[in-house]
Every structure is written in structure tokens, then in C-alpha cells.
Amino acid sequence: MKPTLVTLPHLCAQRVGIEAAAQIVGAGETALLAEPLLGLIASRECPGHVLLETLDCVPEWVKAGRVIVSGYHSPLEQQVLRSVLRRKGRVVKVLARGMKEYRPQPEEREPLTTGRMLVITACPTEVRRTTRETALARNRLVLALASEIIVPYVADDSPMARLLEEICHA
């Protein structure tokens, strides 16, 4: 899928920042950005009971019609993505790398073509791999886009913990 420039709704563009918003490209259903987004971020390492408790919430989110925005990078986030897509829910996936062309995973193909999924990035095309810096930028974008945030688990003294601390005190 060839990405195109994404125009964020005014409120989202303000939260993201006009300059950053002007760089966002994506593939899929851009109308999802006009809805209230439920942000999901979690550390890579997470206790099993937290994963199970979070997955127990997915049917409720899908039934309520929530659009979930995340990087879907950590194991917990990946499980949530699979669960939401299986249940015919809607998602916005934020990449921490550029996207010259987006090659969707098999489970993403149908949601992308039926308007249940959007994949976006603010990274330049030449950024080919996720780095600590691009991962933090992705998480900042997820937090800026979300009208509500869910953080099932954050490891102590992790980059994500510091990011949340920074945002909470901003």
C-alpha cells in the first residue's frame, strides 16, 4: 500500500503540533482519526496477569465502538491488536519508522481494505528501523492523538516511564 499525506482533524493537529502533523503519512481509513481515540501503551516486559486483564477489556472496547491507537509494538500491544482485529474492531497503528510502502501483515489486510484500520507514521521515509528515539517519538504521537489513555503496565525507570512522567508534568 502506498502511503499518502494524512490530514489530522484540527484538535489532533493542535495536540500533535502543526509542524509534526504536516509530516504524517498513512495508509488505510483516515476518518478514524476524527473519532475519540483510546490510546494504549505498555512496556515490552509485562506480567502475565496484566496481559490477561487487558485482553479481558478488549471485547468491551470493541462493543463500545472505540478506536484504539497504539504502536502495537510491545507483546501486550500486539496481543491487543490481534484481539481487536479478530473481533472486527477499529485501530490506528503508529509506526516508529518511515513507510515508503506499507506491507500489511496477513491479519491487517482485510481491516485496511474495509476501513477498520489506519497505519500512520511521522518518521521520514529514510528511517528504516525502529530506534529508541523513534519509539519514543511514536509513543509521544500516540499520547498526543489519544483523547483517553490506558497504560496497563510500565516498567520502573524505563524510557516509557520517563516519557509519561514528562507528559504528566508538562
Image (cartoon, helix red, strand yellow):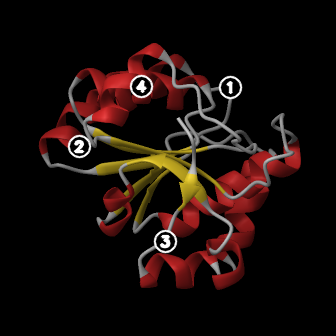
Label 1 is placed on what type of residue? Answer: Glu
Query: What kind of element bears circle 2?
Result: helix
CA gap between label 2 and label 1 equals 23 Å
Task: Give the residue type at disc 3.
Answer: Thr
**Which mark is on residue 108?**
4
Q: Circle 3 — which element?
A: loop
From the image, tell me which residue sits under label 2: 61
State yes or no: discs 3 and 4 in contact (Cβ < 8 Å): no
Name the side, left or right, on which 44 lies relative to 117.
right
Rounded to the nearest angstrom, the CA distance separating label 1 from label 3 is: 34 Å
The image shows residue 77, relative to residue 97, as above or below, that is above
Name the spot of residue 70 as percent of width and height, x first.
52, 45
Position of 128 compared to 4: left or right? Answer: right
Q: Residue at x 71, y 80 (%)?
A: 19
User: In the image, which disc is placed on residue 45?
Assistant: 1
Where residue 157 appears, as percent x and y from the top left, is 82, 47
Q: Which residue is mark 3?
A: 7
Q: Residue at x 60, y 57 (%)?
A: 25
Instruction: Indicate which label's residue lies in the foreground, 1 or 3.
Output: 3
Q: Earlier in the sequence, mark 2 or mark 1?
A: 1
Amino acid beneath label 4: Glu
N-term mark: 3 or 2: 3
SS for tag 1?
loop
- Rendered view: 104 above or below 144: above
Q: CA distance from mark 1 to mark 4?
A: 24 Å
Res. 158 image quadrant = top right
Percent from the top left, x then y, of residue 2? Answer: 57, 41
